[in-house]
Image (tube, coloured by chain):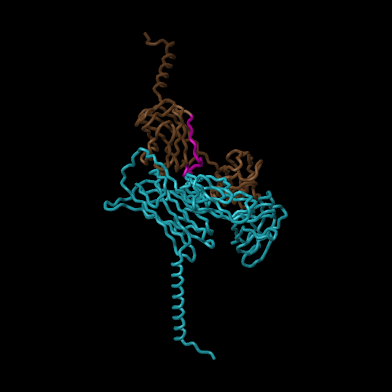
Chain colours: A cyan, B brown
């Protein structure tokens, strides 16, 4: 029997529906608010005009001074999965102006040549979005700002300039980190140079990348603080020293050598007193012996609807390796075309015009690779 | 009666010239100015000035650098962007007020020691902006006692601003042309000790100014990352973009290569350009 719906019933159903939707929405928002973003954010400053070398969460400055900011967003090793679409934005109170072309990032390859591309987004309303941060990996940012020459002083209180970085990711609450600059009078600093003895207290935080291959090895970037006090970087199990160099007080470049056995390995650090730091870094070595491996596709994001040449980097990439792409959602396989070997570690190939949008896994001779390709 | 006969005139001229030379400041030696980028209107340019004095100048003393008025120094915060070293003296810490933006003069002082002849002084000034048009400009360096009006040593040298690209009308595009990989630094063949590290750079240029995807693949050993800036290069390729990375020689020894590929993604005009950087691992 069919019950006729009159106007009152429809209204009741609508009210109940709106109520239920509202309750669910409130629960979801509450859940998001209570789920903290599983990253650590370090935001520190130092006054370059005052020749400060150490990073602090607050500093003092006078009008016209140059301030350097350092931000490190670090996903702890304990994270079970990678964080997708992490968005950063930076906001400063008036009185502090970003200095163009000073944005840098060792982990993202940002330097003076391409800073302009990122700085508008990062310091604008849109913010900057990272595709992902994997467990144990990090993102670093460094930039300079200038305290305005005409910043006003209030006689009754010390003026403060606040700088804030917000980190967001879908389904998590926002994480906000702040630094403060307190302004003092325009009396010039003494001209005499103060000599300081620097006490190092190195701290290791994260490493990009955490995966390498037994036949290839990998160049990695390690982030932390006070790296001037690091005297050795080595594999913990074998005590074999890595090839490494200090890029800055916050970044070390190091090499994971080829020839390690597949599985997990640990990197340990020695300080300038030859003590081993408590913090170690674990990385995985993937098997690659006697097989063709594709480590990376460049570019790894392409547009659909047009034939596109990509470069594949790896090992044993002979002209007769069979390289295919598999759509991760549909499982459909198709082969790359016009394979052209540059040498046994590099080849180029074409993605056909007919390839549909989606995320693709790369297969070499029917073996799945770590490298991915996205067609938009 | 004439005061001088004609035969004395050359002697008088020589004596007069000698007096002028004696009273003029001596000339600085081994003087050079290096700009990180010579392109007109380029901002964030670092100027590195090196020289040696001829005379000894005691403390307190001043070093005055006068930049051509066509250079824009308004973005230079002297306290953070100027460094000075060498000369055998202890330099005062640099203050913002040491740079006069009205006269484009930078005054640096020392209060201890004497500026030693033959002892190189190095001054680096970051965040300068080049003149808007190419041509020859000047830079003058003078040294002398504190607050000098007549320098002890001084010299002016030309600074040339040159466009590295070619100006073309917007209505006449370049034919599609492949990018070039040049400027390998250090000079090939690059010799690296086994187990050591070596920073390496190269320049990718594309006259069309296209975005370029590039890769760097060593035949042995590893590199720190794909390079800085990261691939793809999205701007500035017409005048060239410098890519830097660190090579770790933790692989095989002997003659090796680092293969660089560059693709400007043009439909025609070639395909992927490759260049093998020659290494020798000892």
Magenta stretch in the rendered image: B30-45
Position of B251 relative to A18 (above/below) = above
- In this orientation, does residue B171 appear? no
In-front residue for pair A178/A249: A249
Residue in the picture at 65% in, 46% down: B219
Residue B173 in the image: state x and y as whole percent: 59, 49
In-front residue for pair A59/B128: A59
Position of A328 relative to B277 (above/below) = below
Residue B162 in the image: state x and y as whole percent: 52, 39
Q: Residue furthest right?
A: A320
In-front residue for pair A15/A221: A221
Q: Residue furthest bottom?
A: A1
Placement of the C terminus of chain A among the 4 image quadrants: bottom right
Question: Residue A336 sits in which quadrant?
Answer: bottom right
Q: Is residue A5 left or right of residue A162?
A: right
Q: Residue furthest left?
A: A156
Placement of the N terminus of chain A among the 4 image quadrants: bottom right
Q: Does the magenta portion include B41?
A: yes
Number of numbered labels in the structure image:
0
- In this orientation, does residue A76 appear? yes
Q: Is residue A78 left or right of residue B141?
A: right
In-front residue for pair A66/B198: B198
Residue B230 in the image: state x and y as whole percent: 55, 51
Position of A353 relative to B72 (above/below) = below
Residue A170 in the image: state x and y as whole percent: 49, 65
Q: Does the magenta portion include B114?
A: no
């Amino acid at each position: 029997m069919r019950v006729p719906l009159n106007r009152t019933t429809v209204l009741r159903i609508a009210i109940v529906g709106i109520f239920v939707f509202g309750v669910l929405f409130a629960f979801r928002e509450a859940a998001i608010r209570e789920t903290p973003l599983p990253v650590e954010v370090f935001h520190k400053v130092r006054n370059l005009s005052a020749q400060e070398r150490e990073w602090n969460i607050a500093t003092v400055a006078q009008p016209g001074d140059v301030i350097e900011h350092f931000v490190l967003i670090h996903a702890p090793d304990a994270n079970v999965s990678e964080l997708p679409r992490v968005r950063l934005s930076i906001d400063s109170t008036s009185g502090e102006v970003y200095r163009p072309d000073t944005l840098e990032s060792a982990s993202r390859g940002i330097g003076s040549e391409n800073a302009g591309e990122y700085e508008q987004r990062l310091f604008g309303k849109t913010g900057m979005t990272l595709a992902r941060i994997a467990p144990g990996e990090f993102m670093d940012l460094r930039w300079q700002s200038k305290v305005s020459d005409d910043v006003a002083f209030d006689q009754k209180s010390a003026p403060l300039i606040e700088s804030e970085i917000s980190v967001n990711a879908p389904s998590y609450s926002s994480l906000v980190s702040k630094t403060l600059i307190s302004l003092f009078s325009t009396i010039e600093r003494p001209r005499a140079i103060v000599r300081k003895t620097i006490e190092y207290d190195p701290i290791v935080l994260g490493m990009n990348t955490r995966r390498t291959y037994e036949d290839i090895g990998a160049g990695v970037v390690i982030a932390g603080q006070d790296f001037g006090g690091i005297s050795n970087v080595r594999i913990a199990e074998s005590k074999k020293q890595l090839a490494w160099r200090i890029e800055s007080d916050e970044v070390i470049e190091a090499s994971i050598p080829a020839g390690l056995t597949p599985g997990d390995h640990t990197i340990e650090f020695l300080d300038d007193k030859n003590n081993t730091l408590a913090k170690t870094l674990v990385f995985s070595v993937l098997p690659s012996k006697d097989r063709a491996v594709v480590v990376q596709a460049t570019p790894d994001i392409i547009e659909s609807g047009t034939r596109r040449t990509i470069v594949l980097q790896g090992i044993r990439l002979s002209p007769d390796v069979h390289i295919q792409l598999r759509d991760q959602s549909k499982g459909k396989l198709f082969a790359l075309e016009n394979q052209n070997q540059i040498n046994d570690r590099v080849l180029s190939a074409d993605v056909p015009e007919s390839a549909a949008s989606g995320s693709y896994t790369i297969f070499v001779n029917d073996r799945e690779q770590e490298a991915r390709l996205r067609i938009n | 009666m004439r005061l001088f006969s004609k035969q004395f005139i050359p002697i008088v001229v020589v004596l007069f010239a000698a007096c002028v030379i004696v009273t003029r400041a001596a000339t600085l030696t081994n003087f050079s100015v290096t700009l990180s980028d010579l392109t007109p209107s380029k901002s964030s340019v670092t100027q590195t000035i090196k020289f040696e004095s001829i005379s000894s100048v005691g403390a307190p003393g001043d070093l005055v650098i006068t930049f051509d008025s066509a250079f824009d120094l308004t973005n230079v915060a002297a306290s953070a962007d100027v460094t000075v070293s060498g000369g055998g003296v202890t330099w005062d810490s640099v203050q913002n007020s040491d740079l006069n933006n009205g006269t484009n003069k930078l005054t640096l002082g020392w209060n201890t020691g004497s500026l030693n002849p033959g002892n190189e002084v190095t001054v680096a000034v970051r965040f300068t902006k080049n003149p808007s048009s190419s041509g020859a400009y000047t830079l003058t360096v003078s040294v002398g006692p504190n607050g000098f009006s007549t320098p002890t040593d001084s010299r002016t040298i030309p600074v040339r601003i040159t466009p590295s690209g070619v100006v073309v009308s917007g209505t006449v595009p370049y034919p599609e042309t492949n990018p070039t990989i040049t400027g390998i630094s250090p000079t090939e063949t690059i010799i690296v000790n086994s187990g050591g590290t070596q920073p390496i750079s190269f320049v990718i240029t594309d006259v069309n100014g296209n975005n370029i995807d590039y890769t760097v693949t060593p035949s042995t050993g590893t590199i720190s990352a794909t390079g800085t800036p990261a691939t793809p290069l999205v701007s500035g390729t017409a005048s060239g973009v410098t890519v830097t990375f660190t090579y770790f020689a933790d692989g095989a020894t002997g003659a090796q290569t680092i293969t660089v590929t560059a693709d400007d993604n043009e439909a025609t005009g070639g395909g992927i350009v490759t260049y093998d950087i020659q290494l020798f691992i000892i």
